[in-house]
Amino acid sequence: MTKEELKQKVCDAIDKRAEDIMSFGTSVFDEPELGYKETKTSAKVQEAMDKLGIPYTTGWAITGVKGRLKGKNSKRTVAVMGELDSIVCRRHPSADPVTGAAHCCGHFIQISDMLGVAMALKDAGAMDYLGGDVVFFAVPSEECIEIEYRKKLMDEGKIHFFGGKQEIILQGGFDDIDAAMEMHAYSTDDPEGNIILNGGMSGFITKLIEYHGKAAHAAGQPHLGINALNACMLGIMGVNALRETFQEKDHVRFHPIITSGGDLVNVVPDLVRMESYVRAASADAMKFYNDRINRALRAGADAIGATCEIKDMPGYLPMEQDKALGKICEANADAIFGKDHVDTNPPFNAGSTDVGDICNLMPCIHPHVGCVHGALHSAEFELFQKQAAYIKTTKVMAMTVIDLLYDNAAGLEDILKDYKPRMTKEQYLAYMDSLRS
Ligand SMILES: [Zn+2]
């Protein structure tokens, strides 16, 4: 069978599995779970792999699942990834009434597409023609949220990183993988849906900030207290005064939330807790602005005699996708989405993903697929282009896997012969630990 015939056979298999792929997506969408707690979603993935007869291992970053289809040989391995977690968006119509979790970032689509690729390669008997294995990696905890909760897991030794892929890098789960890909949903006005390739994204440093003051009666004796909430507000205002020095090229973002702003209304708050990131387009810029922001935050405490404790911890690295792998994906995207619906030169995206970390270690791509209305992470998030999300994207990824592994993995070997990772795994782990304060 020629490569083109194999691609056609796999695409036909995806069409036949359309109902299975979409209903899996709906099932995950209906039961959103937060990072490192995705037990039901993980069980669904395991059940789907059981049904397909795909062997897998579990326990990757607590809830992760790693399935593997073997090719003619196992010289090389390509990973298709999907994320298990959701975010909190209490006003989303589908939000879990207890946890507030809702799939407003579209990770339910990734997981379905990952399984769609598995179904199609299996149904079409494609692995007999591929010179390498395909790993289907369901990864936990892409959203870097609930920092206090995760810091507790960290202190208990249950995790070392906030991001699931980072944790799996540490566990060695990517040691036997040569290239990786993962799609991500995006907002679009294109009624037919579109696909966005090669985009860069920011990295960030994660921060836990505490202001300590002194409690006193809020009305009778406020002169005996030190108001930690005022210190916190001054700290934020200090950062706001710095914003005019943020250079556009660095795409700096500081977006704190106060997770505890005092206990009782008639007591001067003596403890205020805040979480934030400092995001920027490069690792150097992340550190540069983080130092200045920390100075401003501390100054808020100094102004009124409070104290400020800042814990900096590694977030994610800026994302730079592999161009050679992107080219292969582009040809398949042109064929499936149509050239008019493929954007190869998008503006920089100041968001972040732990796929950025993977991009430092191996050739990796992260296409954004325009298939939703409303902003990501918002109550208006709504998947409207199911065909683009579930079928076209799955075809593009499956075809790209075939391009990489057909003919004794000639396509992948071609990429790897010129490829030099930006970091080894050891350098990566050492660098990430250097970001801890
Ligand atoms: Zn996401």
Image: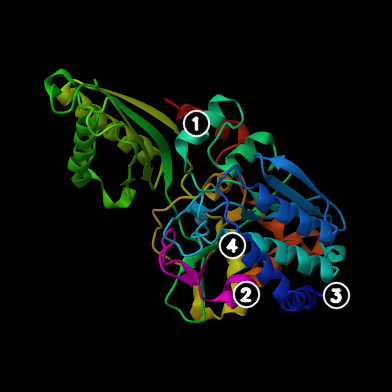
Assign the C terminus to one quadrant of the image.
top left
What separation in Å lies between label 4 and label 3 (alpha carbons)?
38 Å
What separation in Å lies between label 4 and label 2 (alpha carbons)?
19 Å
Res 361 quadrant in image? top right
Mark 3: amino acid: Met
Q: Which residues are magenta?
A: 369-390
Q: Secondary structure at mark 1?
A: helix
The residue labelled by disc 4 is 29
- Mark earlier in primary sequence (4, 2): 4
Q: Secondary structure at mark 2?
A: helix
Residue 44, position as x, y percentages in the image: 71, 56
Crowding around mark 3 (Cα neighbors within 10 Å: few <14, some 14 to 19, many 20+) is few
> In front: mark 1 or mark 4?
4
Q: Secondary structure at mark 3?
A: loop
Residue 140, position as x, y percentages in the image: 61, 47
Which residue shows up at 77% across the image and 66% down it? Answer: 119
Res 311 quadrant in image? top left
Which color mode does the image show?
rainbow
Which residue shows up at 48% across the image and 52% down it? Answer: 100
Residue 392 tag number: 2
Mark 2: amino acid: Lys
> In front: mark 4 or mark 2?
4
The residue labelled by disc 1 is 151
The residue labelled by disc 3 is 1
What separation in Å lies between label 2 and label 1 (alpha carbons)?
39 Å
